[in-house]
Amino acid sequence: MCSACEAGAFPLDEAAHAFMVEALGRPLADAPQDTPPRALRQAERAIIETVEHHANLRLRPALIG
């Protein structure tokens, strides 16, 4: 993580961190299915903010039930 991202970081629950670590390197179809919605929202936020900062792209949030 770069220093700018670390300085502007927000809390990331253990479940969100575990989801990101477990899902990384797997096909999307094999992503963990029992992840709580709050953890998914936090993981999504981390991905969106990182991409916006480093790639100058704006991603649309996914609709998570």
Image: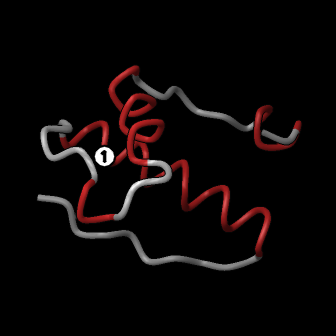
Residue at 40%, 20% (x, y): give it. Answer: 14
Quadrant showing the N terminus: top right
Q: Position of residue 26 (x, y in %)?
A: 40, 55
Residue at 80%, 32% (x, y): give it. Answer: 7
Left or right relative to 24: residue 58: right
Quadrant showing the C terminus: bottom left
Image quarter for residue 49?
bottom right
Task: Name the secondary structure under disc 1.
Answer: helix
Image quarter for residue 48?
bottom right
Find the residue positioned furthest to the right.
3
Label total for image? 1
Camera-side residue: 43 or 19? Answer: 19
Left or right relative to 39: residue 53: right
Residue 59 lies, with reference to residue 26, above or below; the image says: below
Image quarter for residue 52?
bottom right
Q: Position of residue 50 (x, y in %)?
A: 67, 56
Q: What colour scheme was applied to this rendering of the protein?
A: secondary structure
Which residue is tagged 1?
Answer: 40
Q: Amino acid at mark 1?
A: Leu
- Residue neighbourhood size for the residue with mark 1, other residues' Cα within 10 Å, grouped as few (<14), some (14–19), many (≥20): some
Left or right relative to 55: residue 15: left
Camera-side residue: 44 or 25? Answer: 25
Residue at 18%, 36% (x, y): give it. Answer: 36
Q: Position of residue 30 (x, y in %)?
A: 25, 56
Residue at 33%, 26% (x, y): give it. Answer: 15
Residue 16 lies, with reference to residue 65, above or below; the image says: above
Find the residue positioned furthest to the top.
14
